[in-house]
Image: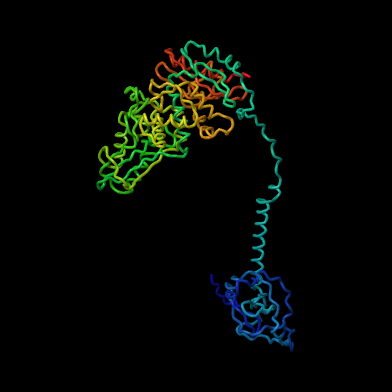
């Protein structure tokens, strides 16, 4: 803003005759603002009749012509700096009288104001003068100074109250620490060790339940390898889905836990054509938010990636990753509609389920075709057909499954047969066997044998336990679980197998045991973790339990009975495991 002088106002000038001065807006940034200068007492002004004026301080050379200053220029002062002393080469000027100024139309001599003049050689006593005593610059400075002081005072009071005043300092003493009483305690090998006699006494009654029919089983203390209870433990019996313990162990021992199954779409042989290359991942989610597989990749993601590469007019799908039959030995077609299984192919959605979120819902008999058609529909192409991906074809899109360790956990929790067979084929590929039912079984056996497990008496034809012809001894199950449950890691197998324990369903809490452990077995709820197994006339339970002394025990129970599995056989097996929980059997 520019201030124009009114009629009675006079322009302000430096009262330094023949001295060099500078406009305030030309002063260096290092020079002090005249607002920051200390107040000085003014000497008596000279009268016209006096012959001479008081001596002036030495002036600095060279001199310059006085220049008029505007009020708006006075406000552009720079940060303060202490005045510099006179340089050695400067010569003091003898005092001289300063005659009164004759500057018409001004009537009164200007009144000086303190203002250091910088930018040139400085003179400490240079002052601004004003011609109007009542409306001088000092009044303006005083008002501004008061405003600044008031603002600073208010800011200081605010800062004191907000950031360090008495209200902040006055704090209450800390509350007393909470009393922690953990309900779950770490298990160690130092807990009292149970004895075979004590364990046998504890489960003799539950094992004699007639609802169980023929029972074989084994109980082992993994801390020392002691067999605590044995009943036909080396006799091969039908394991049903408890066979998944062996497939899961072989996967953890041979595959990297972070490995993922990859599904790709590549450029086809014809312009506008693409080929879906099945990578063995049966968990791809077809409908967002409706999946029984945590962390599953989505079909929509794959479609969107391919769409960005251009229009698609033809879709094919390549299933060459697997060989052999799509259904296992002794599998029944009724199991597809019943929700137990789907044909094992390397490309499908949601494990072949018709209702993606229903774990036990019906599955489709043509999962690869259904998945490829869903892809074609979403990308805007006609229905898909079987084809082969060209060698070295450009990849247009790729999605990956959850890591192997998570897939193993998922297959154990919900006892998913399709996912288990897919993992068995990945073990086969990793070990150089053909990716088929026979190749998967051979790979599982090879890995377990290589790691020191005795498979004598074990014969099985699939990896999931769906075939009724599978036979394994209970001791093989407890041997594998004992290796996973050892309290120390001196056994190289233990570290790799440890995730097997957390993959087991929790009694009354998760997976296939979520709705069990009520009534007579309720004391085992939360303490038993086990893999279930169910076929017609066959029930099994294999896992770990923590007894009341804090000792971890491993068990496997296998029952052949025609009694009602829901209301008699399974509850009887649950009571056997719960009896181990209540055992202070030392």
Q: Position of residue 549 (x, y in %)?
A: 62, 23
How was the colour assigned to the protein in this rendering? rainbow
Q: Position of residue 100 (x, y in %)?
A: 68, 86
Q: Specify the farthest residue to the bottom.
A: 51
Q: Is residue 511 above or below residue 102?
A: above
Q: Is residue 3 above or below residue 253?
A: below
* Residue toward you, 504 or 302: 504
Left or right of 494? Residue 363 is left
* The quadrant where residue 334 appears: top left
Q: Specify the farthest residue to the top.
A: 210
Q: Position of residue 215 (x, y in %)?
A: 48, 15
Q: Position of residue 95 (x, y in %)?
A: 73, 86
Q: Write the residue at 41% across / 26% down.
A: 464
Say if residue 492 shows up in the picture. yes
Q: Quadrant of the C terminus?
A: top right
* Residue toward you, 417 or 516: 417
Say if residue 409 shows up in the picture. no
* The quadrant where residue 472 appears: top left
* Residue toward you, 232 or 239: 232
Q: Write the residue at 46% across / 29% down.
A: 449
* The quadrant where residue 82 appears: bottom right
Q: Is residue 134 above or below residue 287?
A: below
**Count of marks placed on residues:** 0
Q: Write the residue at 46% across / 39% down.
A: 258
């Amino acid at each position: 803003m520019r201030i124009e002088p009114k009629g009675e106002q006079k322009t302000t000038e430096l009262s330094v005759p023949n001295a060099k001065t500078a406009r305030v807006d030309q002063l260096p940034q290092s020079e002090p603002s005249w607002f920051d200068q200390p107040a000085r007492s003014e000497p008596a002004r000279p009268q016209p009749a006096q012959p001479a004026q008081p001596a002036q301080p030495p002036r600095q050379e060279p001199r310059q012509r006085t220049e008029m200053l505007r009020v708006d220029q006075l406000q552009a002062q720079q940060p303060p700096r202490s005045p510099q002393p006179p340089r050695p080469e400067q010569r003091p000027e003898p005092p001289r009288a300063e005659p009164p100024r004759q500057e018409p139309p001004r009537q009164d001599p200007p009144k000086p104001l303190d203002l250091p003049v910088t930018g040139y050689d400085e003179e400490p006593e240079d002052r601004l003068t004003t011609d109007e005593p009542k409306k001088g610059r000092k009044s303006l400075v005083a008002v501004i100074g008061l405003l600044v002081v008031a603002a600073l005072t208010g800011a200081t009071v605010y800062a004191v109250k907000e950031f360090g005043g008495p209200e902040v300092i006055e704090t209450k003493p800390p509350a007393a620490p909470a009393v922690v009483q953990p309900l779950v305690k770490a298990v160690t090998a130092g807990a009292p060790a149970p004895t075979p006699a004590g364990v046998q006494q504890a489960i003799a009654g539950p094992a004699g339940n007639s609802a169980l029919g023929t029972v074989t089983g084994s109980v082992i203390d993994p801390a020392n390898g002691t067999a605590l209870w044995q009943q036909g433990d080396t006799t091969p019996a039908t394991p049903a889905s408890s066979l998944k313990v062996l497939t899961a162990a072989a996967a953890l021992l041979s595959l990297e836990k972070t490995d993922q199954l990859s599904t790709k779409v590549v450029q086809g042989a014809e312009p506008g054509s693409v080929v879906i290359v099945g990578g063995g991942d049966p968990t791809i989610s077809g409908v967002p938010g409706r999946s029984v597989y945590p962390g599953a990749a989505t079909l929509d993601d794959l479609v969107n990636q391919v769409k960005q590469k251009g229009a698609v007019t033809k879709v094919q799908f390549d299933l060459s990753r697997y060989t052999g039959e799509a259904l296992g030995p002794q599998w029944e077609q009724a199991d597809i509609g019943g929700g137990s299984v789907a044909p094992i192919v390397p490309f499908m959605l949601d494990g072949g389920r018709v209702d993606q979120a229903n774990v036990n819902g019906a599955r489709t008999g043509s999962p690869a075709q259904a998945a490829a058609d869903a892809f074609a529909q979403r990308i805007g192409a006609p229905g898909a057909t079987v084809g082969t991906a060209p060698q070295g074809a450009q990849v247009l899109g790729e999605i990956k499954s959850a890591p192997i360790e998570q897939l193993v956990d998922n297959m154990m929790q919900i006892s998913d047969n399709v996912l288990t067979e897919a993992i068995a084929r990945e073990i086969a590929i990793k070990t150089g066997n053909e990716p088929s039912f026979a190749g998967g079984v051979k790979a599982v056996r090879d890995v377990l044998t290589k790691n020191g497990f005795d498979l004598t008496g074990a014969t099985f034809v699939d990896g999931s336990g769906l075939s009724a012809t599978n036979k394994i001894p209970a001791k093989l199950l407890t041997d594998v679980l004992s290796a996973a449950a050892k309290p120390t890691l001196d056994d190289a197998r233990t570290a790799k197998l440890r995730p097997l324990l957390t993959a087991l369903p929790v009694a009354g809490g998760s997976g296939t045991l979520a709705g069990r452990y009520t009534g007579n077995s309720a004391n085992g709820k939360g303490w038993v973790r086990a893999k279930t197994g169910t076929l017609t006339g066959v029930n099994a339970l294999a896992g770990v339990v923590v007894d009341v002394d804090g000792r971890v025990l491993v068990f496997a129970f296998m029952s052949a009975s025609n009694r009602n599995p829901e209301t008699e056989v399974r509850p009887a097996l649950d009571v056997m495991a719960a009896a181990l929980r209540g055992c202070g059997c030392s």
